[in-house]
Image (spheres, rainbow, N blue to C red):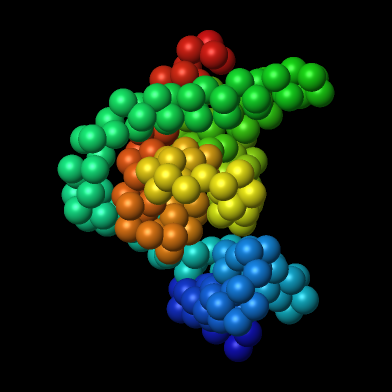
Amino acid sequence: MKEVICSSPFFGITVSIAAYSIGVWISRKTKIALFNPLLISYLIIIPALLIFNIPLEWYDKGGDVIDMFLSPATAVLAITIYRQRKLIKEHLAAVIAGTVAGSACSLLTVLALCRLFSLSSAVTASLLPKSITTPLAIAVSGSLGGIQALTVLAVILTGITGSIAGPLLIRLFRIKNEVTQGLAMGAASHAVGTGRAVEMGEVQGALSSVALVMSGIITVILSLIFFS
């Protein structure tokens, strides 16, 4: 009976939606940045699978269905970009400079730390694309000989950390410019940060979406240059 229920795709979908909904509720009630809905959902789902001895393969049947919506959800951000197209044209130079600088900084930091701690080339390749959206990060990691599972973990941790720390750092350094806020969130923490930027405002969401896309393209090019 357990296998029939838990191995169904509806199980993984239901558990994921329920856990994320709880995370959203907790985040809204507490209004504490650390209580990120995505982070909370992980803290609910992983222990639940371990406690009830549910194989990851069963859960993944529903998780794979949810994964199908990742690319379309990212594409929907184009609507926000279109609405703010005039603003983007006005700040095109800043957008290009910001995304290039953000991507280069991320890659060089990873390379420096990996060499400092004498990590293998496979681990280095896995961590390089940590700041871009998952589909692109997996492609970059695979082409460089990285470990895709490690890449996914790095992308998730980067996104959650950026969505939590980003707004705090923006307030700490008193960054008032909405364009700067959006570019920083998108370039540093990809889709997760962009989701948080959309909550901050439409301008931030639009610029973060642009930074997400451009950072992905730039990271692909720079990764091949730095790691080849």
Answer with the quarter of the image where residue 164 lies.
bottom right
x, y percentage for residue 55? 66, 67
Residue 147 % position (x, y) = 61, 35
- Residue at image location 56% in from the left, 78% down from the top: 28
The residue sitting at the bottom extreme is 1
Residue 128 image point, x, y percent: 58, 29
The residue lying at 44 percent from left, 60 percent from top is 200
Picture layout, residue 99 above or below residue 162:
above
In the rendered view, tell whether residue 80 sits above or below residue 113.
below
Q: Residue at x 48, y 69 (%)?
A: 62
Taking the image as shown, residue 194 lies to the left or right of residue 6, namely: left
Horizontal and vertical percent for residue 38? 57, 64
- Report the residue that reaches farthest toward the right: 117
Report the quarter where the N terminus lies. bottom right
For residue 218, side relative to residue 164 (left or right): left
| Corner quadrant of residue 226 | top right
Q: Is residue 115 above or below residue 103?
A: above
Residue closest to the eye, 59 or 92: 92
Q: Is residue 148 visible?
A: no
The answer to which of 160 and 178 lies nearer the viewer is 178
Q: Is residue 202 left or right of residue 23?
A: left
Q: Residue at x 29, y 34 (%)?
A: 91
Q: How many marks?
A: 0
Q: Is residue 200 above or below residue 108?
A: below
Query: Could one spot residue 202 in this view of the protein?
Result: yes
